[in-house]
Image (tube, grey):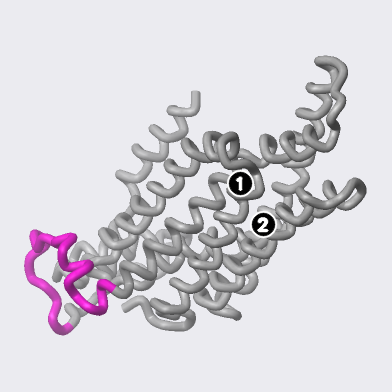
Amino acid sequence: MVVLPAVLVLVGRFFVPESASWLMVKGRVAEAEKALLQLLNRQPTYPTDITLGAPAGAQGSPEVKISFRRFLGDKKLRRATLFATVPWFLQDLGTYGIGIFTPLILTNAIGVKREHVGSVAGLVYNDLLAAKGAALIDVLLIVGILAAIFLTDRVGRVRLQMIGFLGCAAGLAIAVTGNNAGTGWDIPLIFAGFMLFNFMTNLGPNAQTYLIAGEVFPAANRGVGAGFAASFAKIGAVTTAFLFPVLLKNIGTDALLIALVATSVLGAFITWVFRIETKGVSLE
């Protein structure tokens, strides 16, 4: 059942108009005009016609090949590539690990505190309590993305991504503190930490990495650059999805969360070092 939506999206992408900016860079002016008319299709029709002039330095052939080597060899493209890929990779380590395994982490925390579970019903109760807690925590994802929509063009991508990474680190640090706190403080701190993490990840890196990857590359390289950044990031997502439960079992919750605190701080540092702010800047 889960394959069907993916197939529908795949088929639908064949009917999405090509980027007019990319077509113009390639010198395909007539196709760019057609693409713009498709995007501006409305009733009543307006505008009825579009005329574009070829930009200076536009490539005359659409067959120009883009080498991945150029993304690391060209100084400007290298900076954009590192800025778009590394923070996204680091963000996926935490977001997918925490997002997928929040119920498991909560079960471990709650189960450890309740040392004497006398029946299967008690075990089920712990699992249900963790699932309800995860659902409550996930509400903050919605709040975070709404805040990102409101603040991105006001605050800027770089600042929000840095704030988000540091907020994620703070949330996970609070969760670690809660995992070692005494009865009465443990569960509130764990929940508060994960709620802060979810809010900050969607306010910052989980939202901004998508925007940044689609904005920092020149039009001629934008599709390949953004695609490479997304693919590289998904290495982190797949890695954490497979290794998270293994590491959780072998090194424990505290060590794993502390490692994710470190990756979040590193994400903020990399964002600052290679920052390219695109707020209010023309994509051309």
Say whether residue 76 is magenta: yes
Image position, residue 198 (x, y; %)? 66, 55
| Badge 1 amino acid | Ile
Corner quadrant of residue 42 = bottom left
Residue depicted at 57% across the width and 66% down the height: 165
**Neighbour class for label 1 at 10 Å: few (<14), some, many (≥20)?**
many
Residue at image mark 2: 172
Say whether residue 67 is magenta: yes
Residue at image mark 1: 98
Q: Are marks 1 and 2 in contact (CB under 8 Å)?
A: yes
Disc ID at residue 46: none
Q: Residue furthest top?
A: 120
Residue depicted at 36% across the width and 39% down the height: 10
Q: Is 55 left, or right, of 214 in this rendering?
A: left
Image position, residue 136 (x, y; %)? 77, 45
Q: In what element is the residue under mark 1?
A: helix
Residue 29 visible, this angle: no
Mark 1 and mark 2: span between their CA atoms?
Answer: 10 Å
Residue 267 visible, this angle: yes
Q: Which residues are magenta?
A: 56-78
Q: Nearer the viewer, residue 48 or 257?
A: 257
Q: Specify which label sits upstream in the sequence, 1 or 2.
A: 1
**Neighbour class for label 2 at 10 Å: few (<14), some, many (≥20)?**
many
| Badge 2 amino acid | Leu
- Residue 184 drawn above or below residue 221: above
Residue depicted at 56% across the width and 45% down the height: 97
